[in-house]
Image (tube, grey):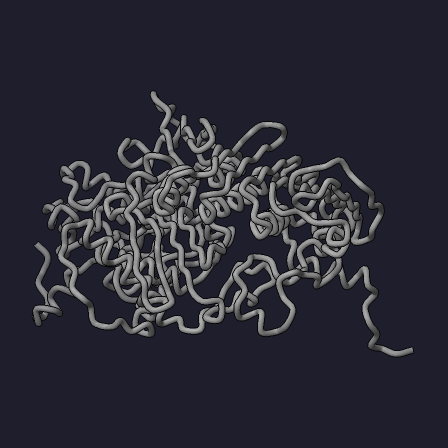
């Protein structure tokens, strides 16, 4: 018997489907793209069971005749490519001919379609990649396709789907992206029989006005009205979009939508350029809101890098980086009233190195320049801590005397003939971090009800992701509930957050940490707890009395790791009497 043999057709088709269809949102993305390619001006989405049970998409596009309805489910069947050179001139979304084939391989699908001006519609029913039935159907406008029992024949893949709330959030994000890229198209979403999203087709005369209004529809009216417009054309490459002013940065990086030739993408070059433009103005842990559209010739990029076409590769990353950076920098500078001069050409390599720390993870870099501090072991680790250097080793004395503050940021103490310097923010951050995390671990988090709910405006997809974390947030002392389609009400927060002005920022940063799909589970727990401790702590330049300073040091000495804050920045430095004498080149002074 031969060892190497071809895979059975049904096995091969399911493996191929796994490359394209990862979750219900993958199905929705492919089908919406088909509707847009068909010239639809209206797309209606119906969802049941977070897309696992049923997804139905109805559009008013060009439709298909019976022969095309059958051929659409065959592998690598497409109307957009006839020869290899066509790949260099594609302007449509779908082109591989894998979408319907892959969807049908792992679900039950029915498609009804009628070509424009035809009097008859045709219906095709598939299950597990096999044609079950086809027949004439009542006339419909455009195409209606229904996908049910997703992954019914691949249960192993179904086990890897997230909670219903999480999957609904992914579905909503797909609709938001399609709506932003196509403001002249109307989108409606009904989930479990209720209308959850409605983006009417924008009728403004100017495309710019339509795009701005659609951005406000998705991001919220208040946030959308504040957006700046940026534009730059460099040869065949153009950059247009909307971005937040420097005084309205957001605690979350999830309100960033990037499009290349109207296709939603994830691309590190564009993201680095976005953060480079904000570099002179942005505080750490604050992120721009952005809806950016790049238009480039089809032969200048490769959208075939990944089966989902989410990732793209440019022929010249340097040109992309420079054009995006210049466009956004000019808009930001003009909004600040700063005259703009033609800058020297930027070096993409140097900018990429400058951004190598990635705007996506900034824990230790938020406190210091240069290399990030080593990662502190996840609390409450019982592993023996590394011996701190001599100057960082904490030491205390019951006769400690408070001498004052330096720039109202560092506390100065005298004890046993030496000097102890304490960073007041880092010290209290460590104290609150250990206290808060132990409360979470023991299930005894103190909560405080807010007299008035804190309203946080987020896109509907972000609302879904937050609601999926309801139990985790409750264990952390937060109570949240939806209010409308794009607003979240926070009704309760941990008692440790006693500063009203910090609550909204803390909540945004917490949600950002918990919903970051790239963060490891342990890291996200650590970072989320550190975020709350950071926002609740006394800040640099806050005045502390002698009693408050001594109490802070007393609390710090009780910590399991008093040497640094949760982000790895030192909390104290000490110079004992021997070290002072050595540095002043003295043999040593007798104690008083």
Which quadrant holds the C terminus?
bottom left
Q: Residue furthest top?
A: 451
Label total for image:
0
Give the image location of residue 437, x and y in percent: 42, 42
Q: Is residue 304 left or right of residue 261?
A: right
| Residue under the image location 55 percent in, 29 percent down | 195
Q: Is residue 251 visible?
A: no
**Which picture quadrant has residue 259?**
bottom left
Give 57 or 321, whichever is nearer the viewer: 57
Q: Residue furthest bottom?
A: 2
Give the image location of residue 343, x and y in percent: 20, 68
Give the image location of residue 543, x and y in percent: 14, 40
Q: Is residue 237 left or right of residue 540?
A: right
Q: Is residue 430 left or right of residue 548?
A: right
Give the image location of residue 451, x and y in percent: 34, 20
Seen in the picture, residue 493 relative to 321 is either above or below; the reply is above
Q: Residue furthest right?
A: 1
| Residue under the image location 61 percent in, 51 percent down | 34
Q: Is residue 145 visible?
A: yes
Give 141 or 477, whichever is nearer the viewer: 141
| Residue under the image location 53 percent in, 46 percent down | 174
Which quadrant holds the N terminus?
bottom right
Give 552 or 360, whichever is nearer the viewer: 360
């Amino acid at each position: 018997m031969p060892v190497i043999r071809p895979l059975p057709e049904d096995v091969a088709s399911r493996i191929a489907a796994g490359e394209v269809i990862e979750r219900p949102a993958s199905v929705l993305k492919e089908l919406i793209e088909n509707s847009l390619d068909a010239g639809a001006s209206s797309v209606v989405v119906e969802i049941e069971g977070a897309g696992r049970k049923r997804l139905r998409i109805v559009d008013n596009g060009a439709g298909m005749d019976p022969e095309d309805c059958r051929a659409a489910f065959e592998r690598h069947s497409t109307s957009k490519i006839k020869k290899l050179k066509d790949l260099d001139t594609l302007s449509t979304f779908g082109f591989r001919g894998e979408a319907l084939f892959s969807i049908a391989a792992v679900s039950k699908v029915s498609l009804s379609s009628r070509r424009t001006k035809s009097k008859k519609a045709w219906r095709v029913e598939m299950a597990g990649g096999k044609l079950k039935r086809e027949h004439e159907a009542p006339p419909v406008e455009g195409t209606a396709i229904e996908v049910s029992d997703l992954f019914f024949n691949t249960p192993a893949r179904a086990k890897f789907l997230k909670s219903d709330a999480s999957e609904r959030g992914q579905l909503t994000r797909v609709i938001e992206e399609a709506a932003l890229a196509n403001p002249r198209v109307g989108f409606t979403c009904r989930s479990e029989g209720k209308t959850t999203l409605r983006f009417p087709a924008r009728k403004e005369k100017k495309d710019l006005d339509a795009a701005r209004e659609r951005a406000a529809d998705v991001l919220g009216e208040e946030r959308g009205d504040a957006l700046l417009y940026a534009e730059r054309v460099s040869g065949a490459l153009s950059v247009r979009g909307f971005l937040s002013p420097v005084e309205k940065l957001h605690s979350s990086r999830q309100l960033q939508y990037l499009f290349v030739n109207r296709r939603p993408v994830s691309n590190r070059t564009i993201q680095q350029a976005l953060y480079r433009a904000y570099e002179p103005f942005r505080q750490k842990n604050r992120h721009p809101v952005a809806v950016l559209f790049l238009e480039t010739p089809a032969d200048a990029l490769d959208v075939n890098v990944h089966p989902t076409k989410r990732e793209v590769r440019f022929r010249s990353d340097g040109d992309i980086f420079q054009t995006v950076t210049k466009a956004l920098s000019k808009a930001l500078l003009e909004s600040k009233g700063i005259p703009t001069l033609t800058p020297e050409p930027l070096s993409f390599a140097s900018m990429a190195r400058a951004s190598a720390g990635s705007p996506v993870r900034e824990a230790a870099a938020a406190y210091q320049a240069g290399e990030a501090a080593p990662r502190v072991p996840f609390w409450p680790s019982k592993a023996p801590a590394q011996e701190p250097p001599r100057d960082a080793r904490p030491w205390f004395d019951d006769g400690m005397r408070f001498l004052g503050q330096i720039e109202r940021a560092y506390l100065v103490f005298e004890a046993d003939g030496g000097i102890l310097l304490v960073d007041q923010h880092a010290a209290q951050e460590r104290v609150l971090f250990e206290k808060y995390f132990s409360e979470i671990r023991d299930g005894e988090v103190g909560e405080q009800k807010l007299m008035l709910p804190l309203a946080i405006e987020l896109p509907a997809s972000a609302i879904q992701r937050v609601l999926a974390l309801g139990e985790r947030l409750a264990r952390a002392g937060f109570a949240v509930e939806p209010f409308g389609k794009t607003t979240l009400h926070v009704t309760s927060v941990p008692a440790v957050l006693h500063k009203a002005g910090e609550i909204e920022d803390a909540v945004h940063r917490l949600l950002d940490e918990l919903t970051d799909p790239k963060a490891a589970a342990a890291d996200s727990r650590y970072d989320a707890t550190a975020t709350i401790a950071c926002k609740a702590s006394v800040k640099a330049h806050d005045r502390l009395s002698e009693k408050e300073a001594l109490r802070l040091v007393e609390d710090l000495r009780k910590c399991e790791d008093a040497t640094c804050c949760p982000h790895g920045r030192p909390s104290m430095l000490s110079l004992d009497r021997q070290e002072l004498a050595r540095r002043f080149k003295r043999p040593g002074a007798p104690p008083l």
